[in-house]
Image (cartoon, grey):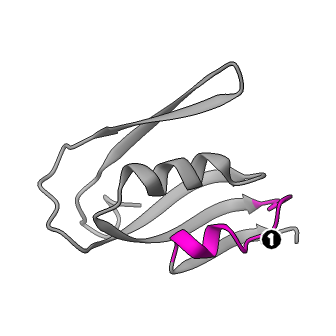
Amino acid sequence: VADHFNLPLVQCLKTRSGGEVSIKYFDSVDLPYNSRLLVVDDICDGGRTFMELASALPFANLDLYVTHGIFSKGKEELLKQYDSVRAFEDWT
């Protein structure tokens, strides 16, 4: 997506351990405070990973786009951290 729109790419990786989600943010580009970031992923089930990601990027304004949105816990909590939450296939 970043290549298609000629935008910088910021990579974050998640690990799970004992039910806990940890996000590692790799600052591959220098992002100014209040940057607008589009988070792109393949699936969102409950949304915990994306809530942890938002906590790891407190300086940014975030939008979330996933290809498959189950949103089993609803979108309400996500919308507290993200300006918009959208899915190509939205199963809510």
Locate residue 30, reporting x and y percent.
11, 55
Secondary structure found at label 1: strand
Locate residue 41, reporting x and y percent.
57, 53
Residue sitting at 45 percent across and 34 percent down?
13
Instruction: Find the residue positioned furthest to the bottom.
Output: 83
Q: Residues within 10 Å of mark 1 (few under 14, many from 20)?
A: few
Of 61 and 8, nearer the camera is 61
Instruction: Find the residue positioned furthest to the top.
Output: 18
Number of marks present in the image shown: 1
Instruction: Say if 48 sits above or below 5 in the image.
Output: above
Prevailing secondary structure class for the magenta stretch in the rendered image: loop
Instruction: Say if 21 sits above or below 71 in the image.
Output: above
- Report the quarter where the N terminus lies: bottom left
Q: Is residue 40 left or right of residue 56?
A: right
Locate residue 36, reporting x and y percent.
32, 74
Quadrant of the rendered structure where residue 33 is?
bottom left
Residue sitting at 15 percent across and 51 percent down?
29
Amino acid type of the residue tagged 1 in the rendering: Asp
Residue linked to disc 1: 90
Queried whether the magenta region covers residue 74, the answer comes back as: yes
Locate residue 20, reporting x and y percent.
64, 29
- Report the quarter where the C terminus lies: bottom right
Instruction: Say if 48 sits above or below 69 in the image.
Output: above
For the record, the magenta segment spans: 69-82
Q: Is residue 32 left or right of residue 35?
A: left
Queried whether the magenta region covers residue 3, the answer comes back as: no
Q: Is residue 36 left or right of residue 22?
A: left
Residue sitting at 71 percent across and 27 percent down?
19
